Image: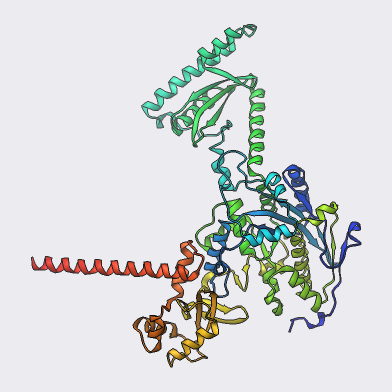
């Protein structure tokens, strides 16, 4: 029964205000989505910045090359928050984002949703020849097939998709690109220098002094090419643009620092630059001679602009991520744990090893994330809907939530047929849920981080049947999707080694017949995949008893064990997920873990035995 029966209706009124779409059919709506590729990225970025600034929320939606390599890699109802994160991490590190949809939007009291959807086509090519952002990625055939059926243009993606580097990759890339960069070292007092440092500084100071003197007193009227070439060869200088420059080879970061200190303290109109080496570090320091203080300021401004342009080229699509982050606008998503592990992996830094570290890192970049899945849980029956169109369809049939969608931007007919529509649906679903739950989604003037009425729904990472906000209750889970009963993970076991084709019901019957303690009402069985099953015991202590009994061989459990039936506790499943070596079959992964655990136990027992023997022999001596 919905919590707001007075709003329940058998109809829903949703309109789209755009003259070019008046003749569209109500089913399979096509909104004008601005398609962005490498060729129009710069202009679109400026436009997106303005739209984000004028809007209250930013919805995001990703189209990836896959999400799991095997059925058990998906989030399962009995997964804890940590395991859910590890599975999402595993997928994010192997698959790739091909489309990233962004939709700044606002919802007004008149129930009008004003949206500005953009769909960015991405492809992680190595444009700067530095081996980044990635060498390879995996593809799930069903995902590519679905994209092909929706007329996705893979040629546009590969040849005109926008590349990018993460923040961590950008920092690493700066050391591999050979463009000179300025730097600012903090000068140290001469007393902190060693004798070798002082010798090096005096030698470089003498060389730079002679070079500056020669540059100032050289006969600039000499146009003889040979004479000019000989002068440059003897002095060791060259031109940096129209300004004379000198390269000083260095062998360490310490020498780089000493050159910078010497130049900045002794020569007012000389600008030092670092020439990076290909493998990282510094190859040389280039000192550039300017004609005056004004010319020096002009050169430093040119260098700053050059570094910024280079950074923009390196960042690529990550400029969009930075825009969303700096805006501090609430980010609306669907299945946020999945999306934001991809976003963190591709655009921020390698994913941390634990859920808590991930949450902390993500919160520093996106302080306010709203998952429509979490809002959907306020309306009980919506729990069973896993995709946005199905959830909207349910609300249409059961609630009165009149939302008028206005998309002011224009787009061609071809653009309207392309991808990116899911981000508008997420915005629409969010607006409808706010209407039904009586949440005012308008941002208060004094609170730029979003409406205070949505604070309790903020930063609850959601993927599937469980919401993950606080990992303190990590040991309690809901075993089945439609059963909210919480049980301890210690009450779960994993079985494999049963005959191929055995159903969950058949397996439960076999277990019921194997021992009098295993009555039908004390446990339940579900298949995880074709070769592995999970057993949930509703009474505490039965799982430990089962493991002990099947190992010792009691009753018909001995016969099942003889036929190959094996069992492990939840801890083994957790260890397999943490190993990040997820096999195609859960049974194989668990069997490998069980074998390694047995070998480790055998080695430990042998070590204890020989240590005891050694102690006995020493006592005899």
Q: Is residue 44 above or below residue 274?
A: below
Asked whether residue 547 is in view, the answer is no
Q: In terms of image quadrants, where is residue 457?
A: bottom right
Q: Position of residue 348 (x, y in %)?
A: 59, 51
- What percent of the width, then of the height, locates residue 338? 62, 63
Q: Residue at x 53, y 82 (%)?
A: 525
> Closer to the camera, 122 or 109?
122
Q: Residue furthest bottom?
A: 516
Name the residue furthest left.
Answer: 621
Q: Residue furthest front?
A: 500
- Name above or below for residue 560 compared with residue 180: below
The answer to which of 269 and 620 lies nearer the viewer is 620
Vertical comparison of 61 with 302: above or below: below
Image coordinates for residue 464, horizontal then vertical, percent: 63, 71
On screen, residue 52 versus residue 486, left or right, reads right
Residue 177: tell me if it is visible: yes
Residue at 39% in and 85% down: 559
Residue at (52, 80) in percent of width and height: 502
């Amino acid at each position: 029964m919905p919590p707001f029966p007075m709003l329940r209706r058998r109809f829903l009124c949703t309109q789209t205000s755009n003259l070019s779409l008046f003749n569209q059919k109500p089913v399979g709506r096509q909104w004008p989505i601005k398609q962005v590729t490498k060729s129009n990225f710069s202009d679109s970025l400026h436009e997106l910045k303005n739209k984000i600034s004028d809007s209250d929320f930013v919805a995001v939606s990703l189209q990836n090359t896959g999400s799991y390599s095997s059925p058990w890699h998906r989030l399962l109802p009995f997964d804890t928050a940590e395991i859910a994160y590890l599975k999402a991490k595993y997928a994010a590190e192997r698959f790739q984002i091909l489309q990233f949809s962004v939709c700044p939007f606002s919802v007004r009291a008149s129930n009008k949703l004003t949206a500005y959807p953009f769909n960015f086509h991405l492809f992680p090519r190595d444009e700067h020849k530095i081996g980044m952002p990635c060498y390879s990625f995996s593809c799930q055939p069903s995902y590519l097939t679905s994209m092909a059926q929706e007329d996705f243009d893979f040629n546009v993606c590969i040849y005109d998709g926008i590349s990018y580097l993460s923040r961590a990759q950008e920092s690493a890339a700066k050391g591999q690109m050979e463009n000179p960069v300025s730097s600012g070292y903090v000068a140290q007092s001469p007393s902190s220098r060693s004798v070798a440092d002082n010798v090096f500084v005096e030698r470089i100071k003498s060389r730079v002094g002679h070079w500056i003197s020669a540059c100032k007193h050289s006969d600039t009227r000499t146009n003889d090419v040979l004479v000019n070439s000989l002068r440059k060869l003897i002095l060791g200088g060259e031109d940096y643009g129209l300004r004379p420059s000198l390269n000083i080879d260095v062998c360490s970061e310490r020498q780089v620092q000493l050159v910078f200190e010497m130049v900045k303290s002794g020569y007012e109109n000389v600008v030092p630059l670092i020439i990076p080496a290909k493998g990282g570090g510094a190859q040389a320091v280039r000192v550039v001679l300017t004609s005056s203080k004004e010319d020096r300021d002009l050169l430093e401004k040119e260098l700053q602009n050059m570094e910024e342009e280079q950074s923009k080229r390196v960042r690529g699509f990550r400029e969009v991520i930075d825009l969303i982050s700096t805006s501090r606008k609430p980010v609306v998503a669907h299945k946020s744990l999945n999306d934001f592990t991809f976003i963190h992996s591709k655009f921020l830094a390698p994913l941390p090893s634990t859920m808590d570290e991930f949450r902390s890192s993500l919160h520093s970049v996106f302080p306010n994330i709203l998952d429509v899945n979490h809002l959907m849980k306020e309306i009980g029956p919506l729990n069973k809907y896993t995709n946005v169109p199905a959830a909207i369809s349910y609300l249409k049939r059961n609630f009165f939530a009149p939302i008028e969608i206005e998309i002011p931007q224009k787009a061609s007919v071809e653009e309207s047929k392309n991808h990116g529509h899911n981000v508008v649906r997420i915005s629409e679903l969010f607006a409808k849920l706010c209407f039904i739950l009586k949440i005012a989604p308008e941002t208060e003037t004094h609170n730029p981080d979003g409406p205070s009425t949505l604070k309790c729904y903020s930063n609850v990472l959601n993927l599937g049947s469980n919401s993950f906000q606080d990992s303190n209750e990590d040991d309690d889970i809901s075993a089945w999707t439609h059963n909210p009963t919480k049980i301890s993970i210690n009450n779960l076991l994993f079985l494999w080694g049963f005959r191929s084709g055995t159903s969950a019901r058949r397996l439960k019957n076999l277990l019921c017949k194997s021992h009098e303690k295993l009555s039908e009402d004390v446990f339940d069985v579900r298949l995880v995949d074709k070769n592995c099953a999970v057993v949930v015991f509703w009474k505490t202590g039965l799982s430990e008893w089962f493991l002990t009994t099947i190992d010792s061989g009691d009753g018909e459990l001995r016969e099942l064990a003889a036929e190959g039936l094996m069992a492990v506790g939840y801890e083994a499943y957790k260890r397999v997920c943490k190993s990040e070596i997820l096999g195609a079959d859960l049974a194989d992964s668990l069997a490998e873990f069980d074998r390694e655990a047995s070998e480790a136990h055998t080695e430990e027992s042998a070590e204890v035995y020989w240590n005891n023997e050694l102690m006995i022999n020493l006592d005899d001596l």
